[in-house]
Amino acid sequence: METIVIVGGGAGGLELATRLGNSAAKTGRARVVLVDRWPTHFWKPLLHTVASGKHDPQVMAIDYAAQAAEHGFEFARGEVLGVDREARRVALAPWIADDGAEVLPARSIGYDKLVLALGSVTNFFGVPGAEQHVLTLDDVAQAETFRQRFIDGCIQASARQAAGAPNPGIDIVIVGGGATGVELAAELSHSARALARYNVHAMDPVRHVRIRILERGPLLLPHLHQRLSKRAARHLRALGIKVLLDTAVARVDAGAVIDTEGCTYPSAITLWAAGVEAPALCATLGLGTNGLRQIAVGPSLQALDDANVYAIGDCANVGCPILGKVPPRAQAAHQQALYLAQVLGQASPVSAPFAYRDYGSLVSLGPLAAVGVLTHSSGRKYAVGGALARVLYSLMYRKHQVALHGVVRMSAQTVADWIREKLSPSVRLH
């Protein structure tokens, strides 16, 4: 019986482990082991809702151990230090508890097939001061840090205003006008209003909670049609958010962002959402990578330099005949997990190459609005917006839940979430 080790429990990694656990592991064809440094899974496209306080990650998180027990695979918690491809072993760092005690020593796990689903991390593009002075949204811990900084900053600014300080308020700068930056800006605007409604702060949520988006290109959401990009910009400006296009960042200081024209934007909190790259681990494995450290893979998602290693999701450099390259989206990781579940989980090998299908893209503009494009199987694209786009956007997460839990449990969770939203404040207040 061969051992399949999956490193990374993101959207693609956890779905692949679940599907292989239900098929290959439960039938005795393979032992499936999922490795991740965190104990729980949170769907990364919703991290901006954690940062804004809209969602509680503890409520929405999935315990890897519970998922493993229910679906026939194993979970090993630990941070991967490296991979010995010759000996086919994955080295894990010691597991250290919050109090500094060692829970588990350094160890290694052997594999016959290795799947790298490491996701992505923030790309600072070498901008001076960025890595030292900004916050990012790579994981739940970082999103929680932003949320706490945002609430604390609003309370402090409100106290300064009450004391008669000049220029009251708080400045927030979001670098990057892609989906993450736009979605976070819209949610923060609504959170500022909600916090004022619950008397967490006494400021005007539009005049005194000053949110800016700096985008180096001529349009927000460059992956969407120009008309939709302009629509999103108008919506954000209507919320009181300043949208600054054709604005490239030259450096970041502790309390300000400076663009290449020399303009200074004061910032109590700076969020960097300007791009992603594969984790540094990918460059240490002796496998071919591109400039973003993504692992080069072939048509079957196998690494070009090692037939026993596969890569999926944001850490993989996957070609696409139409797009040139598969974009770093959750739907790509989902499709790759489906494909590999067939390749690795079937008794007879699958010879067809992976083929990515672009179903479109949806971007949230807050609790009540969204914009996006849907792609028909014929290739024709349809622009959507308003309430319809908002409903479709919410269904993306439900589709992820179906892949992990099935329709019945997803439906029950949807009802529970609806009840919780009716009984709880619209944002977390502390």
Image (cartoon, grey):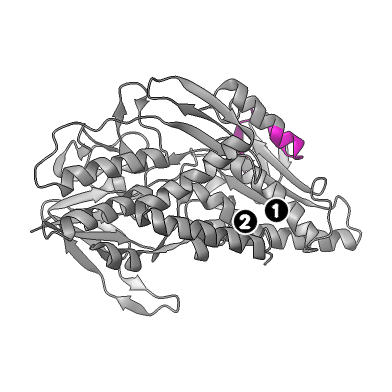
Relative depth, front residue between 8 and 291:
8
User: How busy is the neighbourhood of tag 1: few (under 14 within 10 Å), some, or many (20 plus)?
Assistant: many
| Amino acid at dot 2 | Lys
Q: Would residue 409 appear left or right of 391 to someone viewing this image?
A: left
Hey, which quadrant is residue 98 in on the image?
bottom left
* Quadrant containing the N terminus in the rendered view: bottom left
Q: Would residue 390 appear left or right of 94 to someone viewing this image?
A: right
Say the numbered circle drawn on residue 191: 1
Relative depth, front residue between 129 and 111:
111
Please tell me which residue is depicted at 52% across the width and 35% down the height of the picture. Answer: 362
* Quadrant containing the C terminus in the rendered view: bottom right
Taking the image as drawn, is residue 237 in sight? Answer: yes
Taking the image as drawn, is residue 175 in sight? Answer: no
Instruction: Please say if 312 is above or below 94.
Output: above
Please, what secondary structure does the residue beneath circle 2 have?
A: loop
Alpha carbon separation for disc pair 2 and 1 = 7 Å
Does the magenta run of residues contain 142? no
Is the Cβ of the residue at disc 2 closer than 8 Å to that at disc 1? Answer: yes
Say the numbered circle drawn on residue 54: 2
Q: Which residues are magenta?
A: 235-252
Please tell me which residue is depicted at 44% across the width and 26% down the height of the picture. Answer: 375
Please, what secondary structure does the residue beneath circle 1 have?
A: helix
x, y (%) of residue 181?
Answer: 59, 41
| Amino acid at dot 1 | Ser
Does the magenta run of residues contain 242? yes
